[in-house]
Image: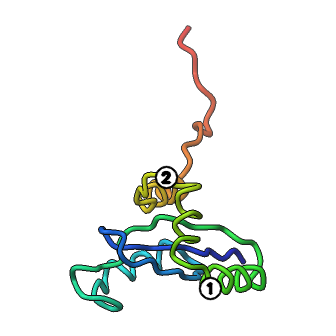
Amino acid sequence: MKRFIYIITDRNRKNLHVGLSSDLLKTLKFYSEMPTLFFDNAQQLNRLVYFEEINTEEMAMDRFKMVSTFTRTQKEKMIRFVNPDWVDLTIGLNFESGLRSKPQLRASLSPRRVAA
């Protein structure tokens, strides 16, 4: 089962929170529903700025432990390497999940009749 390592921050980039999840969209929804769980209103963690998809749980846990020990400077360098403008990546994830969940259009099963 795939796991995700992610870094989420507030709008001022003051706090960087590293997390591990098996369902990233569900986790982000939880953060939006519980905005004051970790911090006050001014420091809501609502901006996904970095994530990695890892195939095994053991590798994900090892990577999570490693990234959690990084200094702020190391985390910022990691974020800037893939997301230099610190854009919220949630928008792209929501778009991709919408594409996956829509049913595929298929051609009609009955043959077309051509007018003579």
| For residue 55, above or below residue 33 | above
Give the labeled residue for mark 2: 84
Q: Sort mark 1 into few (<14), some (14-19) or many (20+) by Cα contacts within 10 Å.
A: few
Quarter of the image with the N terminus is: bottom right
Quarter of the image with the C terminus is: top right
The front one of 2 and 70 is: 70
Q: Please, what is the three-letter code of the amino acid marked with disc 2? A: Pro
Q: Please, what is the three-letter code of the amino acid marked with disc 1? A: Thr
Answer whether labels 1 and 2 touch (C-beta < 8 Å).
Answer: no
First-in-chain label (1 vs 2): 1
Relative side of 58 to 37, left or right? right
Cα separation, mark 1 vs mark 2, equals 22 Å
Callout 2: helix, strand or loop?
Answer: loop
Relative side of 84 to 110, left or right? left
Q: Sort mark 2 into few (<14), some (14-19) or many (20+) by Cα contacts within 10 Å.
A: few
The image's mark for residue 113 is: none
Residue 81 at x, y percent in the picture: 58, 55
Residue at x 75% of width, y 72% of height: 55
Residue occupying the far bottom of the picture: 37
| For residue 77, above or below residue 102 | below
Give the labeled residue for mark 1: 69
Residue occupying the far left of the picture: 41
Residue at x 54% of width, y 43% of height: 105
Residue 99 at x, y percent in the picture: 51, 52
Q: Quadrant of residue 35?
A: bottom left
Residue 69 at x, y percent in the picture: 62, 85
